[in-house]
Image (cartoon, rainbow, N blue to C red):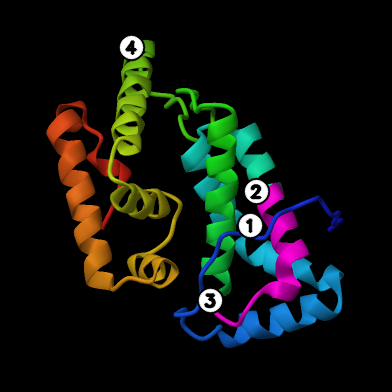
Amino acid sequence: MGLSFAPMTEPKTNLSKAPPLEADDRALVVAARRDPRAFGALYEKYVTQIYRYAYVRLHNAPAAQDATSQTFLKALQALPQFRDGLFIAWLYRIAHNVCADAVRRVPVTENYDALEFQLHADDSPEQDALREIERAAFYRTLNELPDEQRNVLEMTLSGFKGEEIARVLGKTHASVKMLRWRGMETIKARVAAQGLLSEVQE
């Protein structure tokens, strides 16, 4: 893979209480510090999760692709300052800041492209239109949740498991489950009649 550098500021992270770096990530980080070309292994390992997270936050593929690229470029540039901790937690925080900056520059619109909203061959145009409206209502409600609940649900939608979310956010698994439940209860109270509960699985 080709790698290039971009100007950056130090990510706003705090991993002083992070769990020990997993052995395989430790070796990959050490290798990438010695040779930036070795960073490709970390990229390949986590690019899908980071892209899905960026897509959930930004709602369209080009913006998510740009945010993903910025996240990994910033991570590569900042790698010498990375303290031993959970690498994916550090990477997630960079992605979170990149997406937040993107939203401040250009507010997110209700634009769900083919990755998020795929037409079903057996559905009528009316059913497809209703599904798109329901999906947009789900995300509007998601964006209105308190930050902790929204973060947990966004990570769930991005493919993170409960224990992974707990480690990344520095919370217990039980607290993550409670935040997810509270967030979904709020969403159910507003849009349950539109059939959106399949978006998030326990």
**How many angstroms separate mark 2 from mark 4 (CA)?**
34 Å
69 up-or-down from 25: above or below = above
Q: Which amino acid lies under the numbered mark 4 shown in the image of this protein? A: Glu
Q: Are marks 2 and 1 in contact (CB under 8 Å)?
A: yes
**How many angstroms separate mark 3 from mark 4 (CA)?**
46 Å
- Mark 3 or 4: the one toward you: 3
Residue 115 makes an appearance in the image: no
Q: Which amino acid lies under the numbered mark 3 shown in the image of this protein? A: Leu
- Quadrant position of residue 63: top right
Q: Are marks 2 and 4 in contact (CB under 8 Å)?
A: no
- The image position of residue 61, as x and y in percent, is 60, 34
Closer to the camera in the image, 147 or 175: 147
Q: Is residue 80 magenta?
A: yes
- The image position of residue 152, as x and y in percent, is 34, 55
Image mark for residue 68: 2
Residue at (32% x, 53% y) in the render: 148
Give the extent of the magenta segment.
70-85
Q: Is residue 119 magenta?
A: no
Q: Which amino acid lies under the numbered mark 2 shown in the image of this protein? A: Thr
Earlier sequence position, callout 3 versus callout 2? 2
Q: Are marks 3 and 2 in contact (CB under 8 Å)?
A: no
Q: Element type at marker 2?
A: helix
Image mark for residue 47: 1
Q: Element type at marker 1?
A: helix
Looking at the image, residue 62 sits to the left or right of residue 168; the answer is right
| Residue to which mark 4 is pinned | 126
| Residue to which mark 3 is pinned | 86
Earlier sequence position, callout 1 versus callout 4? 1
Q: Element type at marker 4?
A: helix
- Mark 2 or 1: the one toward you: 2
Q: Are marks 3 and 4 in contact (CB under 8 Å)?
A: no
Locate the N terminus and report the quarter of the image it occupies: bottom right
